[in-house]
Amino acid sequence: MELLTARFKFRGLRSTDRAAWIAGLEASQTLHQPWVPIPPPGLTLPARFAAQLAAHEAGTSYKGVAIAPDGRIAAWANLNDIVRSASWSANAGWSVHAAFAGKGVMTEVVMALLDVAFTPLPHGLGLHRVAAGIMPENAASLRVAEKAGFRREGYAVELVHIAGAWRDHVLFAKLAREHRAPVETT
Ligand SMILES: CC(C)(COP(=O)(O)OP(=O)(O)OC[C@H]1O[C@@H](n2cnc3c(N)ncnc32)[C@H](O)[C@@H]1OP(=O)(O)O)[C@@H](O)C(=O)NCCC(=O)NCCS
């Protein structure tokens, strides 16, 4: 499933994305490092790309990328820990390329991610619920969740190890029935 947002093409990760994926993360390390779990230094970006692609292709995660007209990856938006049993749920994660920050990009792309999540099978993932956890100090990401229509559900103490310490997270979720109707697919 490929979606056209106002400014980007949003789709699942492909092997041909390797160079743009690595270049985008290299350019965005300073922006991302305080807020997202960064794997140990021994795990190189090429190795991380291979692991992400494998998870996407196995269907345990949906690793989405927003492709700008110039070919750069403007944002990453993922559905991790996909459960396809009684709950039909996943945990969302997102980050923007540093060169695209502060322009409304992430909200646009998270809405597309939710389109993928909630569009019924076989075109989308047919999920019922998408959750997201955000550090309480991450004002920009909290705002993205709010603008994308997530509901605050709770607060988890020391949920994720980020930038050298266990970090509290505000817990959000959105249900399929709370999301807009699917947009046009290609
Ligand atoms: C969080 C992040 C994804 C936001 O991306 P973005 O494309 O800049 O987000 P958007 O432009 O769609 O929306 C950001 C909103 O936060 C607001 N915002 C930004 N910085 C803020 C701050 N310090 N305090 C309050 N609000 C802030 C913006 O004004 C905007 O809201 P508005 O549209 O009402 O003006 C980006 O900063 C990022 O990649 N951060 C590092 C990784 C990360 O934190 N990922 C999420 C982990 S939960």
Image (tube, rainbow, N blue to C red):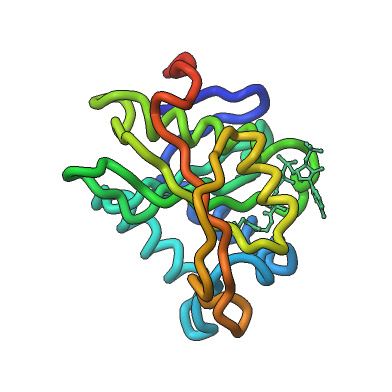
Image quarter (top left, top right, bottom left or bottom right) of the N terminus: top left
Check the image and report above or below for 107 versus 78: above
Left or right: where 180 falls relative to 121: right
Residue drawn at x 50%, y 66% as measured from the top left: 156
- Residue 172 location in percent, x, y? 52, 48
Residue at (59% x, 36% y) in the render: 109
In the drawing, does residue 28 fall left or right of residue 86? right
Of 172 and 57, the residue lying toward us: 172
Q: How many marks?
A: 0
User: Measured from the top left, where is residue 92 in percent x and y?
Assistant: 47, 49
Q: Nearer the viewer, residue 102 or 143?
A: 143
Instruction: Write the residue at 63% across / 63% down.
Output: 135
Side (left or right) of 20 relative to 15:
right
Q: Is residue 153 above or below residue 3?
A: below
Q: Position of residue 175 (x, y in %)?
A: 41, 33
Q: Residue at x 36, y 48 (%)?
A: 90
Rendered view: 108 above or below 25:
above
In this view, the residue in front, 141 or 25, is: 141
Instruction: Determine the image quadrant of residue 87.
Output: top left
